[in-house]
């Protein structure tokens, strides 16, 4: 209970006396819960395994709610001088954390040759959201992409090839029209497709913009292209799926219950994170397929999920311990273990060569889909003042999807708002 | 008798509203006692199960969270009673310089949402060495402006003659409060206690931010384990967990329902 207080006192004493506290370093580790299952127990297990390997370091894992709650908690604690040593936060929180001067560039801490090799060991698509201003700020930990899941039985019943998911935008519509089922009174009992649009519609929408050849933000996070004609076209297509073509339910589709709709046959195709794989595998009572995103001018999906950040601290021993722990969590063996336990994509190629992962992939080939899609993946939308800049796009999308505003007007407005917010960062 | 049988429009409306309000609870009951497959399919013959409760119960150390929540809400309520009573008495009965300004300042606190103060409160607690303690979770709420306001208004309506009579008998200030003011304002205490307990039973963000360990975290933070946004939400387990955590409060309300409602009615008449 008073552990933190004790660390604080110990640190203060160590600092004033100039004594190194390395002999018994305790670090705190904040992590959010974004997937079901006994995640807290898995993480506690990792912390214990780490302590066994490094008896001089004790890790105190603290689960911090959703990603949103986690960043609020981490920033509050850090600003009061009580920062966690390591935290898993959204990769898109990077600019916010940099602008508030809360996190340490990892390349400044990881300077040995082995460290440099470690920083290069991850999939480049994941590093796009982890690097800015010439530094590496985050280590990929629980990362994902969007994939499509389809109900093979429903495809068969509709006279479609059960082994082929829609591969193009045109097929999304034409398959969807065949898959629609209505009851006697004209109510739809099975939709062609569901693309969730609650909470963070920008993420799923970014798959559409990527496929249409648009990039939403620059690498420095200082500019966005919300009203690029290709983005407007993607928004129009998104809205048309329900309003014009009638293959998707009208209005806002809830992220949290989309998998449930899929299990219950209310939709034949759903788009959601690869993090859902384990859930679908457990709950789908029919043959299902997992496929990469369809193409327009190209394929592709944004990456998503959380990175490990190391917070600024005056205590070098703790930072070194934090780095050691981050390295431990991202070894090929642990990356594989975490991927198998949760459904996230193991973050480095050599994790897929471990015996455990090979066995898992052989038993359950859909696990490979998201990994193979990484070559087409782009960085998730992330800018300075990320919350507000992203909210502008979210609001515009929901207005378009509910038919409240035409695509062009809504996105022009979002662009103006985002530009206003980002002006102070453009120099 | 006969008149009672005829349903007046207001009775019908009351029932309709009651049903509307009860719907989420009724749904939670349905989802919690049936397998996940029936969470949104309502068939009378659906099999009943307690598995959801089992899953929910092992997912987090709920007994400990229960204990923490109970200690937290009772601790906060008792401290609020003491502090608000004394402050309210001073403001209601004593004439001193700046009393009105002081009261206005206290009222201003009502208009500040606690969420904007999170960082400042956290800093203060950090200095007091109270991070990750139950005291730390509760202390920002102890000097409640709402409680002071409510009790001050109640004390003002108590006839001064009763106060004077007690003094004549030789009662000290504290004795007067204890023997005269407290009994007469009892309905207010019950009403305010109810509001306080239910607010802190449900409070989430502040406890999450200020606590780090199982020993100090309340139920609401434990419930968060089930909000697995990356995987879709298992309504059956969530409903089971939600029922489990809100049951004590609901049962308490049902048991003390008559007392609660009477005290609200009396508080209103006064």
Image: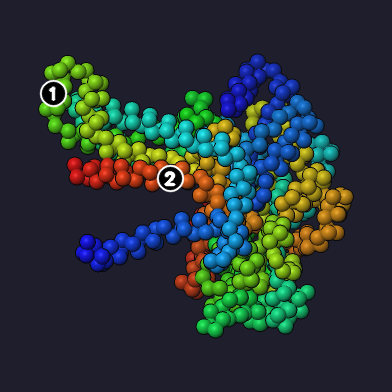
The residue indicated by pointer 1 is: B164
Which residue: 17% across, 36% down? Answer: B157
> Which of the 4 quarters of the picture holds residue B256?
top left
**Front residue of B93 and A387:** B93
Please tell me whether mark 2 or mark 1 is closer to you in this view: 2
Is the residue A30 above or below the residue A180 in the image? above
| Tags 2 and 1 touching, CB below 8 Å | no
**Which SS class for mark 2?**
helix
Report the side of B234 relative to B81 (left or right).
right
Q: At which x and y percent is residue A84? A: 62, 35
Which residue: 33% across, 28% down? Answer: B83
Which residue: 57% across, 32% down? Answer: B215
* Residue A38 visible in the picture: yes
> Which of the 4 quarters of the picture holds residue A246?
bottom right
State which chain disc 2 sits on.
B
The residue indicated by pointer 2 is: B251
Which residue: 85% across, 59% down? Answer: A362
Bin the neighbour count of mark 1 within 10 Å (Cα to Cα): few under 14, some 14-19, many 20 and up. Answer: few
Q: At which x and y percent is residue A241? A: 59, 76
Q: At which x and y percent is residue A336? A: 80, 49
Is the residue B189 above or below the residue B130 in the image? below
Callouts 2 and 1 in the same chain: yes
Report the side of B74 relative to B183 (left or right).
right
């Amino acid at each position: 209970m008073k552990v933190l207080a004790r660390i604080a006192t110990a640190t203060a004493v160590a600092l004033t006396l100039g004594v190194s506290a390395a002999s018994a370093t305790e670090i705190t580790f904040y992590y959010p819960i974004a997937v079901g299952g006994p995640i807290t127990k898995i993480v506690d297990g990792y912390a214990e395994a780490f302590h066994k390997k490094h008896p001089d370091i004790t890790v105190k894992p603290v689960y911090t709610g959703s990603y949103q709650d986690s960043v609020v908690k981490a920033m509050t604690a850090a600003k009061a001088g009580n920062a966690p040593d390591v935290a898993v936060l959204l990769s898109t929180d990077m600019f916010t954390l940099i602008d508030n001067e809360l996190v340490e560039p990892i390349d400044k801490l990881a300077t040995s040759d082995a460290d440099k090799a470690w920083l290069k060991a991850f999939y480049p698509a994941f590093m796009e959201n982890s690097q800015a201003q010439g530094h590496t700020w985050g280590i990929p930990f629980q990362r994902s992409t969007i994939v499509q899941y389809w109900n093979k039985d429903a495809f068969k019943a509709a006279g479609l090839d059960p082994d082929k998911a829609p591969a193009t935008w045109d097929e999304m519509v034409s398959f969807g029209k065949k898959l629609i089922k209505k009851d006697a009174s004209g109510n739809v009992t099975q939709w062609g497709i569901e693309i969730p649009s609650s909470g963070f519609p920008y993420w799923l929408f970014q798959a559409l913009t990527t496929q249409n050849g648009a990039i939403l933000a620059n690498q420095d996070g200082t500019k966005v292209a919300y009203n690029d004609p290709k983005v407007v076209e993607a928004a129009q297509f998104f809205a048309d799926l329900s309003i014009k073509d009638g293959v998707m339910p009208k209005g806002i589709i809830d992220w949290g219950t989309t998998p449930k709709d899929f299990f219950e046959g209310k939709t034949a195709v759903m788009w959601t994170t690869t993090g859902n794989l384990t859930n679908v595998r457990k709950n789908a009572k029919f043959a299902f397929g997992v496929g990469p995103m369809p193409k327009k001018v190209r394929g592709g999906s944004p990456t998503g999920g959380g990175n490990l950040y190391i917070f600024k601290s005056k205590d070098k021993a703790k930072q070194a311990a934090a780095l050691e722990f981050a390295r431990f969590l991202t070894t090929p063996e642990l990356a594989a273990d975490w991927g198998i336990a949760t459904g996230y994509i193991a973050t480095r190629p050599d994790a897929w060569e471990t015996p455990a992962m090979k066995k898992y992939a052989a038993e359950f080939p859909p696990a490979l889909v998201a990994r193979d899609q990484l070559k087409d993946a782009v960085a998730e939308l992330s800018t300075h003042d990320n919350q507000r800049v992203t909210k502008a796009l979210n609001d515009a999308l929901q207005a378009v999807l509910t038919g409240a505003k035409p695509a062009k007007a809504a996105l022009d407005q979002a662009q103006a708002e985002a530009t206003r917010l980002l002006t102070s960062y453009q120099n | 008798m006969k008149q009672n049988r005829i349903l007046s429009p207001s009775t019908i409306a009351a029932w309709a509203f009651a049903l509307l309000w009860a719907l989420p609870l009724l749904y939670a009951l349905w989802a919690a006692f049936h397998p996940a497959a029936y969470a949104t399919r309502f068939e009378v013959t659906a099999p009943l199960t307690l598995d959801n409760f089992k899953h929910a119960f092992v997912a987090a150390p709920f007994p400990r969270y229960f204990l923490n929540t109970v200690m937290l809400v009772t601790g906060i309520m008792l401290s609020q009673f003491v502090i608000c009573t004394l402050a309210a008495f001073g403001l209601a009965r004593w004439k001193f310089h700046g009393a009105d300004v002081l009261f206005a300042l206290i009222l201003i606190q009502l208009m500040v949402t606690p969420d904007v103060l999170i960082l400042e409160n956290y800093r203060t607690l950090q200095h007091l060495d109270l991070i990750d303690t139950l005291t730390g979770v509760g202390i920002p709420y102890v000097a409640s402006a709402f409680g002071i306001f409510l009790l001050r208004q109640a004390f003002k309506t108590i006839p001064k003659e009763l106060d004077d009579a007690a003094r004549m008998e030789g009662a000290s200030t504290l004795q007067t409060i204890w023997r005269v003011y407290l009994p007469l304002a009892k309905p207010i205490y019950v009403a305010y206690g109810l509001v306080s307990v239910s607010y802190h039973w449900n409070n989430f963000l502040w406890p999450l931010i200020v606590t780090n360990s199982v020993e100090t975290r309340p139920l609401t933070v434990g419930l968060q384990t089930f909000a697995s946004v990356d995987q879709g939400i298992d309504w059956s387990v969530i409903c089971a967990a939600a029922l489990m955590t809100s049951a004590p409060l609901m049962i308490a309300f049902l048991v003390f329902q008559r007392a609660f409602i009477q005290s609200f009615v009396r508080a209103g008449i006064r």
